[in-house]
Amino acid sequence: MSKEITPRQQDYSQWYNDLVLKGGLADYSAVRGCMVIKPYGFTLWENMRDALDKMFKDTGHVNAYFPLFIPKSFLSKEAAHVEGFAKECAVVTHYRLKNDPDGKGVVVDPEAKLEEELIVRPTSETIIWNTYKDWIQSYRDLPILVNQWANVVRWEMRTRLFLRTAEFLWQEGHTAHATQEEAEIEAKKMLDVYAEFVEEFMAVPVIKGVKTESERFAGAVDTYCIEALMQDGKALQAGTSHFLGQNFAKAFDVQFLTKENKQEYVWATSWGVSTRLVGALVMAHSDDEGLVLPPRIAPLQVVIVPIYKGEEQKALIDAKADEILADLKTIGIRAKYDGNDNNRPGWKFAEYELKGVPVRVTLGARDLANNQIEIARRDTKTKELIHADGISQYIDGLLLDIQNNMFKKAKTYRDEHITQADSWDEFVQLLDDKGGFILAHWDGTAETENEIKEKTKATIRCIPIDDMGLEEGVCVLSGKPSKRRVLFARAY
Amino acid sequence: MSKEITPRQQDYSQWYNDLVLKGGLADYSAVRGCMVIKPYGFTLWENMRDALDKMFKDTGHVNAYFPLFIPKSFLSKEAAHVEGFAKECAVVTHYRLKNDPDGKGVVVDPEAKLEEELIVRPTSETIIWNTYKDWIQSYRDLPILVNQWANVVRWEMRTRLFLRTAEFLWQEGHTAHATQEEAEIEAKKMLDVYAEFVEEFMAVPVIKGVKTESERFAGAVDTYCIEALMQDGKALQAGTSHFLGQNFAKAFDVQFLTKENKQEYVWATSWGVSTRLVGALVMAHSDDEGLVLPPRIAPLQVVIVPIYKGEEQKALIDAKADEILADLKTIGIRAKYDGNDNNRPGWKFAEYELKGVPVRVTLGARDLANNQIEIARRDTKTKELIHADGISQYIDGLLLDIQNNMFKKAKTYRDEHITQADSWDEFVQLLDDKGGFILAHWDGTAETENEIKEKTKATIRCIPIDDMGLEEGVCVLSGKPSKRRVLFARAY
């Protein structure tokens, strides 16, 4: 496979696929819409998962595990929920194969038909609330603050690596509360956790908001979201947190005895982020040479590449590399020495650039003689010669600097791509010419929202939670009054 | 739900279920054969998983993720493999539901039938080797040392919490090598990793061995295993590591260019342990009062319970508890203070005993006045008064002592239950009267193995790898010559 990356300007979509495939993050699989997450991509996901998991635990949550399968009848118990998920789910109908009487293969055994079909979970609200019914009797059993790391399946017709796959990995938090207020606070708290994670670990700036009714999660009262901007000017929903009201408690009859000795339905939230975030990460930072990964979650933070002639130089450089490697590992930096003789330095430079390793250390014989080391950073593509003493401390500071710089750069781009539009013509032109987020007035009706979507493919990404766009005006399409601007964009 | 545990002697099977359910490890679910792993049980699994994951990484392995679904035709490509798994797999046949025209629910949409059915993975050799075909061209691409943490489904007819469930969590290592020797070394190395983990973290002694042909993994050339003994004298297979030869490489046509420029089939191993280990842990150590968990993997290692009268005493004890808790956390001990006023000390004692918390610290006003603290250990049910100064260091040492003592106790029991039988009568009587492992001669034929199984329900657990039973003799059933004794037992 050629390692060449299609330039962004030439074909953005192919550029993205090249990065994912050639950068070693994932592969297509033999199963329609399902991908293989390769070791490099999975290590990246592990780093993201571990950071998130710690944040969940620090905010009082515990992990549990619920069945992969959901009885078909469970889906129907919440009306909006079944409407949202029934059309794209994998259905298990049989539990056995048998030898094909006519050939060498195997066929489904018609005698092993399930009495009730099972759905491969597209999300777990139903099976979890059916379980919570047994766990919750009184207010003493509340709150329940449970998270699950799991695989889920949604039979999407058009799939893209990481961004939209039939099977994907995610976490889904499912909490149960005694009061509406507590559940609403929880939903917002987890949105804050997501925003903090995406900004501080992934170096991707996000806007927090609430979805319109038509973009809400199927079964939610309110869906909060964080929205990020990709380099092609399209938005990407990076995480959602739902206030579910009492919808699932009512669907599964989960009541509790209050302190005042009354029976009440339990209040709920759910919240999730998925391997989709890997796609967001790739699209937010990478360039035409390859991935650019933020140090805090990069599988490899530093690579050391030797340049030498002959065994004598090699031995000196190997020794120095071992010393630096040991120092870096002592202070918790993920580093590797690539002393493989089969590949030339130039090949290695290109390879680690493609893989987005934040810092490259080049050990050359001549520099070492001067007690100097060349350090190249991936984000700015700059190089400098550094005094060899205290090199690990220098790199430690540099990694932090890269992390901050990547966020700053992404934020500058994002901020430059939040534009106000005050007329329909302006709205359409901005979308086509510049893209990005458009802050515009909307009359609050689903009809207008839908008409805008049909005309331009732009959707309301969110109604910002903070005061962004908080001023009265008139709808760009209908001219009817509007209390505040909302955030439009074309989106992934 | 009553917290009472059925005594082992009365009903061993019910005792086990009581421990799992009342100890808060797992629940039955609405889906046949699938369980819910509750937070306490899941934290235990997380601790086991994290320790194993570190051992895998320390031995050079990386994690990846492959699809949940396997095309039906893949299963048939390896003859023994399909024979082993086709009879118990969940089959996805459709990808959509639609509203039931006759009612309120949803039904399978007959128009959304898959062209080829998908199997929910019972194990991933086939989908992985189909992928490795793309990853491996030359000897430079080898070895591949990949592990996957995943859920798998085997439609077992008779299920038991943790021990045998339709869906379970596990890890499956899948490695690819250039030579037979390297693959065989890998398979044995991972068996050693499993043995080390089960003995040193779970405090359960194991015997390493190799399976007979009829007990081999479907598709393996050799299946290595570790076998543990439960308190009812039945054996439990705690982990397996398979040398797969070139079987899957041939089935999926995975060849590589050797250094000598020849095309050869790749050599393979696979190895796995599952949530079944939680069941083994429960059955190996627990007693009639509840779980007994080894400190290294216990979700909670120390619980502090206050005993007081009035607010003044409470305030003093709270302060002391906070101090101890902080000290324990500083040295990395998982500890909790249960100052909940709603429950009496006696209730708490029983609760944490049931949950198997290794160390209980009781803070009483009178003891504190004497600068003393009561420490109770779960494994021996002994209590002692300890000087309050340096209590955290004392507990640190005690946890190590408990870990070692639990292993020693389990090993003593296990060693007492390895018995030699030299005649058929002796064999049968030992099985019925004492149980445990029986070292007996076997003539090496599948016929005899099968006849013994049918007559006694005992199977050959393994042919030990070391010199256990390494002496010539005659088969207990057939009287034919035998080169060495093998290990029989009734098993889970």
Image (spheres, coloured by chain):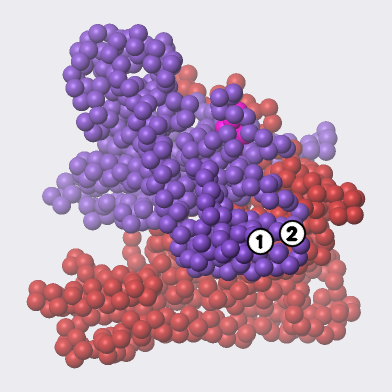
Chain colours: A red, B purple
Residue at numbered disc 2: B309
Residue depicted at 23% across the width and 80% down the height: A363
Residue tagged 1: B365
Q: Secondary structure at mark 2?
A: loop
Number of residues whose C-alpha sits closer than 10 Å to that of mark 2, classed few (under 14), some (14–19) or many (20 or more): few
Q: Is residue A299 left or right of residue A229?
A: left
Horizontal placement of A369 versus B369: left or right? left
Q: Is residue B229 above or below residue B64?
A: above
What residue type is disc 2 on? Lys
Q: Indicate whether B94 appears above or below A451.
A: above
Query: Which residues are drawn in magenta?
Result: B13-20
Q: Quadrant of the C terminus of chain A?
A: bottom right
Type of amino acid at the residue the image marks with label 1: Ala
Mark 1 neighbour class, 10 Å CA radius: few under 14, some 14 to 19, many 20 or more: many
The secondary structure that dominates the magenta segment is helix
Circles 1 and 2 in contact, beta carbons < 8 Å = yes
